[in-house]
Image (cartoon, rainbow, N blue to C red):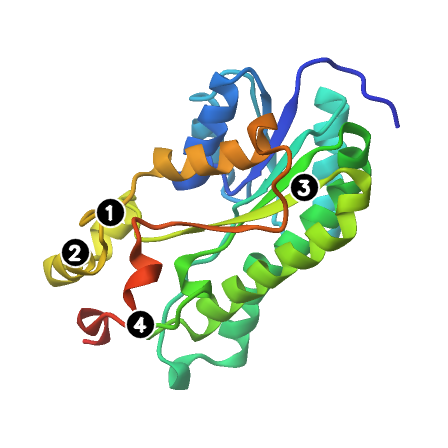
Amino acid sequence: MTTQSLTKCAIVTGSARGIGLATAKLFSEHGYAVAMVDRDSTALAGAVREVDGGHGIDCDVSDPEAVEAMIADALHTFGRIDALVNNAGVADFGPIEHTDFLRWRTVMATNLDGVFLCSQAATPALRETRGAIVNIASISGLRASTLRVAYGTSKAGVIHLTKQQAAELGEYGIRVNCVCPGPVRTKLAMAVHTQDVIEAYHDAIPLRRYGSEHEIAEAIFFLCSDHASYVTGQILAADGGFESTGIGLPALRD
């Protein structure tokens, strides 16, 4: 494999909306070509139009064959891969006793298997560019909470997978880090969080507010950039200090 283009390329999975779309926009603003990956083809088509230099690729990251085809598409289009952001995820919350095995496996397939598959498939290209991987976990992977048995466990798996990848891929010059977002003011969060939950989060977070999608994107881009050239195997909680304040939010138990 040879690097065909001088323009750096980033792959961002789950980039049809939210943090993924904000991240794709930020990479584009910094001169990257961006392969925007999502399984929601309709939403992805609209998102691509918002990103200069964006190239949409329909892909279910839990499907090994689809992932291989996605990486091949990005390389055919851009000639290189400099950064991989494993952002695609399923936010499925429910009590332990109502989480059957199918529900558990559905969450694991996207949130954990997808990170493994995309990283493995992109590794040969990242070796060529001595590139970077950023895996998106969650504050729920660092601290336990109610209704998150599958989601939180999958994100804890992503955190450890990040460390495994950093330990093994470092010899190729590939850096691997993880961002754990805390509560973020996305359209979905604002649609489902009651006023009690919003106020409880504000009380529990030292900065007393939700984060923005752009703030999370900034952390992701930093870890992919040359400014973090000696940073690997790290877990960065972009959470307004939430992880430092203890366990549990009573308002979420109702």
Is there a contact, CB below 8 Å, between mark 3 and mark 4? no
Is there a contact, CB below 8 Å, between mark 2 and mark 4? no
Is there a contact, CB below 8 Å, between mark 3 and mark 2? no
Q: Quadrant of the C terminus?
A: bottom left
Q: Is residue 55 left or right of residue 245?
A: right
Where is residue 249 shown, x and y percent of the image? Answer: 23, 70
The 10 Å Cα crowd at callout 3, few under 14, some 14 to 19, many 20 or more, is many
Q: CA distance from mark 2 to mark 1?
A: 9 Å
The residue most toward the front is 230
The 10 Å Cα crowd at callout 2, few under 14, some 14 to 19, many 20 or more, is some
Is there a contact, CB below 8 Å, between mark 2 and mark 1? yes
- Is residue 43 at all visible to an observer of this figure? no
Give the residue displayed 36% in from the left and 36% down from the top.
Answer: 215
Where is residue 132 shown, x and y percent of the image? Answer: 66, 37
Which badge, 4 or 1, comes first in the chain's sequence?
A: 1
**Element marked by disc 1:** loop
